Image (tube, rainbow, N blue to C red):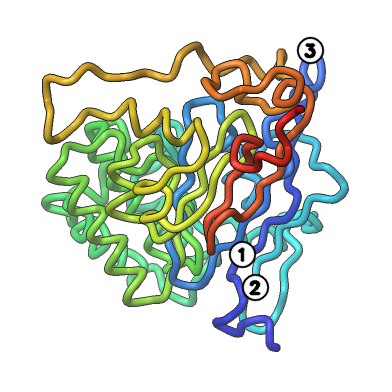
């Protein structure tokens, strides 16, 4: 089959492991992660801070810092216009443009750190369009104004000539979303894209993203800790904990019939709509430091179902226990339990 066959994943990640060299030693941030994103699909990536979501996302664009080590068996393949691009094999800056604002764009968590403070918002939007499209500067400016308007920025023809420090936090986030969407990427990586927005603008931005998915067949990797947003936005969801995928499946499967104790804990920690006075049930303990990574199942130190002698010694594999629904937990397979 051709590499651009719609039946094939737009992006395939296999056995992705990411370590960092630090003064304290080598730290594992992502451990043996695999997933696919189909054309036009929204995949949600959920987990606490420190679970490896952003490191995974930045690996797709090769944006992790210079002390990054990718395991030899790690593979990231982007399929585009009849070819397969081995992302981890790209070396030259010119070749990397395809995954850095070309066919792949990213909305970062912190917009203030992503805009150059001494260059207007409009000039930055125009420059990326000149790099990645065939638009003239006049066309790029007109397109940028239109995108600012579409994400809810008032008087965009004036705002386009302002600097990032003249925008509020929410406006900077909206401008970054407009900039990421302006090249009409095949894959949009959205890293907590609505965190700084009020609920009205958040709804507007989510509607815009859904519309672009429908209009252009764009796929989205949507990273968040908010399961409510995932329920609105995603088709499938992968739940990460300390660098590993704990559970993956359709949004309906994972939210209605969670299988992994970590996913169950995340859902139990949410406020109950039908009982607003009910006490929240947090997951006990804290996510361990990557410098002190637990042996065996990385969740066993906080897991109410942990089996001593098994969960603290062996790493559970992500295995399908229902059609399209997989989890990495020994409790789901009684045959794995110690005698």
Q: Between residue 102 and residue 16, name the one nearer to us.
A: 16
Q: Residue at x 64, y 34 (%)?
A: 243
Per the rendering, the mark at residue 23 is: 3
In this picture, residue 225 sits left or right of residue 14: left
Per the rendering, the mark at residue 52 is: none
Q: Residue at x 78, y 30 (%)?
A: 314
Which residue sits furthest front?
339
Against 154, is 52 above or below? above
Against 270, is 334 above or below? below
Of pointers 1 and 3, the one earlier in the residue sequence: 1
Name the quadrant containing residue 52: top right
Q: Which residue position is annotated with label 1?
A: 11
Could you tell me which secondary element the residue under label 1 belongs to?
Answer: strand
Name the quadrant containing residue 71: top right
Q: Residues within 10 Å of mark 2 (few under 14, many from 20)?
A: many
Of pointers 1 and 2, the one earlier in the residue sequence: 1
Q: Position of residue 173 (x, y in %)?
A: 31, 41
Front: mark 1 or 3: 1
Q: CA distance from mark 1 to mark 3?
A: 34 Å
Could you tell me which secondary element the residue under label 3 belongs to?
Answer: loop
Q: Count of labels shown?
A: 3
In this picture, residue 77 sits left or right of residue 325: right
Q: Residue at x 22, y 28 (%)?
A: 271
Q: Position of residue 329 (x, y in %)?
A: 62, 37
Q: Which residue position is annotated with label 2?
A: 79
Are discs 1 and 3 less than 8 Å apart at CB?
no
């Amino acid at each position: 089959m051709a590499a651009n066959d719609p039946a094939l994943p737009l992006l395939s990640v296999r056995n992705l492991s990411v370590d960092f060299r630090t003064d304290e030693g080598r730290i594992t941030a992502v451990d043996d992660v695999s997933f696919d994103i189909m054309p036009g699909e929204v995949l949600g990536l959920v987990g606490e801070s420190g679970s490896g979501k952003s490191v995974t996302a930045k690996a797709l664009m090769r944006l992790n810092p210079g002390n990054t080590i990718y395991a030899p068996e790690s593979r990231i393949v982007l399929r585009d216009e009849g070819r397969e691009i081995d992302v981890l094999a790209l070396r030259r800056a010119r070749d990397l443009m395809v995954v850095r604002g070309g066919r792949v764009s990213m909305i970062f968590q912190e917009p203030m750190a992503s805009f150059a403070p001494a260059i207007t918002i409009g000039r930055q939007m125009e420059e990326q369009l000149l790099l990645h499209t065939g638009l003239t500067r006049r066309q790029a400016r007109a397109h940028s104004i239109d995108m600012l308007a579409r994400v809810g920025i008032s008087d965009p023809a004036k705002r386009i000539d302002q600097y990032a420090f003249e925008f509020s936090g929410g406006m900077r986030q909206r401008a970054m979303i407009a900039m990421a969407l302006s090249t009409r990427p095949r894959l949009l990586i959205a890293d907590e894209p609505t965190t700084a927005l009020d609920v009205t603008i958040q709804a507007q931005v989510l509607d815009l993203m859904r519309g672009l998915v429908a209009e252009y067949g764009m796929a989205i990797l949507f990273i968040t800790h908010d399961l409510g947003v995932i329920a609105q936005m995603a088709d499938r969801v992968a739940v990460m904990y300390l660098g590993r995928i704990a559970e993956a499946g359709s949004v309906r499967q994972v939210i209605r019939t969670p299988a992994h104790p970590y996913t169950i804990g995340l859902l139990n920690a949410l406020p109950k709509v039908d009982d607003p006075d009910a006490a929240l049930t947090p997951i006990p303990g804290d996510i361990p430091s990557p410098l002190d990574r637990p042996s065996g199942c990385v969740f066993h130190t906080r897991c109410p179902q942990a089996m001593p002698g098994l969960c603290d010694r062996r790493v559970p594999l992500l295995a399908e226990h229902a059609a399209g629904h997989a989890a990495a937990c020994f409790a789901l397979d009684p045959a794995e339990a110690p005698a």
